[in-house]
Amino acid sequence: MFGTITKTSIQVRCTNTPSNLSAGNSGLIVRCVTTGSDSGWKQDNDFWTLTDLAPNTRCTFTVQTRNGDGVTTPATSATPVNTLNSRYTLPVDPMVTCDRATGNPAYPSNTVFTFTNQAGWGQGNLQRYDYGWTSDPGPTYNSSSWSSGALAKTATPLASST
């Protein structure tokens, strides 16, 4: 079960609290397969917070328990299963700049607008931006993805209506 997730941390705990968790040598351990970190053997099922992560990082977790005699169970599967045992940290804040003022300035046809992702691409940054670009004043547009380098888009003239 997951708690608070930030750009640099994830809270996680066992979905079910084992019975007699505080008896004898009983305990549970949460491991992050991605980083090799673990909670250490605990006799409670409070959230463990994994810190010092990069933004936009997928972390996969396993849990293992032991009984009062110190006998351990096999760890849960480390294979990422949708959202059952893995989560991404939050991405960095989007930060796109354009080499031209946007809004309502009048630009001639075929003016090129170059957009730059100041936050960076890939692990620890952003994977992609989804954007729309249209020459129609209406609400419909075709969407595309942008995932590397700078993005150059050319303004085209509006179709004249007669």
Image: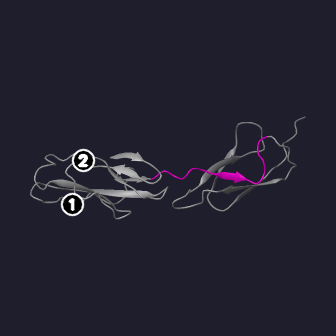
In the picture provided, is 118 more to the left or to the right than 35?
right
> Which picture quadrant has residue 65?
bottom left
Closer to viewer: mark 2 or mark 1: 2
Image quarter where the C terminus lies is top right
* Classed neighbour count for the residue bearing mark 2: other residues with Cα under 10 Å, few (<14), some (14–19), many (≥20): some
Secondary structure, mark 2, is loop
Residue at the extreme right of the image, as rendered: 162
Residue at the extreme bottom of the image, as rendered: 36
* Classed neighbour count for the residue bearing mark 1: other residues with Cα under 10 Å, few (<14), some (14–19), many (≥20): few
Queried whether the magenta region covers residue 123, the answer comes back as no
Label 2, on which residue? 45
Amino acid type indicated by mark 1: Pro
Q: Which residue: 35% across, 47% down?
A: 2
Q: Which residue: 9% across, 57% down?
A: 69
**Disc on the earlier residue, 2 or 1:** 2
Queried whether the magenta region covers residue 99, the answer comes back as yes
Q: How many marks?
A: 2
> Which picture quadrant has residue 25?
bottom left
Discs 2, 1 touching: Cβ within 8 Å: no
Q: Where in the figure is residue 44, as x and y percent of width and height?
A: 22, 48
The CA distance from mark 2 to mark 1 is 18 Å
Q: Where in the figure is residue 21, as x and y percent of width and height?
A: 16, 49
Amino acid type indicated by mark 2: Asn
Q: Where in the figure is residue 101, as x and y percent of width and height?
A: 78, 47
Magenta region: which residues? 89-103
Q: Which residue: 60% across, 50% down?
A: 94
Residue at the extreme front of the image, as rendered: 52
Label 1, on which residue? 74
Secondary structure, mark 1, is loop
